[in-house]
Image (spheres, rainbow, N blue to C red):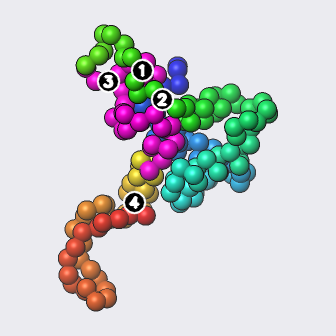
Amino acid sequence: MGPHHSGGHEENWDFVAIRDIVAMVLYALHARDGRPVPQVPWDAVLWHLGSDGRVVTLVEGALPHLAPGSLAVPADERIAERWQWLNKTWDPQAPLRPQLQGVDGTGPRWDGLSRGIGRALPDPAVEVCTSWAAIAVEAALTAERGGYRLFQRVRVAEGAFRNQYGYVRQLG
């Protein structure tokens, strides 16, 4: 199974980027703290997803062989490949595969994956999709802990606005 296939279907660039950013943060926290991945707290993952700079600092600090210019041989080549893909600069002017031109933008331009987020940007996935990865983790945490959803209507229980209604504008 290739790096962009799961369950026999091709994924899009956005999903691969978001999934791999979350996975890299989980793995880096596991490596840094010596905890099994299932015991890494999601709150810590979410904090690191607060900016792409935090993600890069964490991953390259916990896994120094992934830092640019490192001559160390990675313990797991797949992790090094994923980090390299997440940091790859893209050519938004690269040609599309002829059979797919005009259909959905899929082609060699983004490793044969369709891309919806920042299609015109050459920026690496870690820069473009970290905030999207944070939204995914935040939504999972909110659901797991019975929290409010974004734009959910609520009644204020305490304070100056008690018994007034409003909408949730920010989570996390």
The location of residue 18, given as percent across then percent down, is 46, 41
Frontmost of labels 4 and 3 is 3
**Residue type, numbered disc 1:** Ala
Return the residue at label 2.
90
Disc 4: CA contacts within 10 A as few (<14), some (14-19) or many (>=20)? some
The location of residue 20, given as percent across then percent down, is 52, 38
Q: Quadrant of the C terminus?
A: bottom left
**Residue type, numbered disc 3:** Gly
- Kindly check if marks 4 and 3 are in contact, taking CB atoms under 8 A apart as contact: no
Please say whether residue 32 is visible from this viewpoint. Answer: yes
Alpha carbon distance from label 2 to label 4: 33 Å
Mark 1 vs 4, N-terminal side: 1
Which numbered disc covers residue 105? 3
Which numbered disc covers residue 152? none
**Residue type, numbered disc 2:** Trp
- Residue at x 73% of width, y 35% of height: 69
Helix or strand or loop: what does disc 2 sit on? loop
Helix or strand or loop: what does disc 4 sit on? helix
- Residue at x 30% of width, y 60% of height: 150
Asked if residue 20 is among those painted magenta in the image, a careful observer would answer no
Helix or strand or loop: what does disc 3 sit on? loop
Return the residue at label 1.
94
Q: Which residues are magenta?
A: 103-131
- Residue at x 70% of width, y 40% of height: 67
Secondary structure mostly taken by the magenta-highlighted segment of the chain: loop
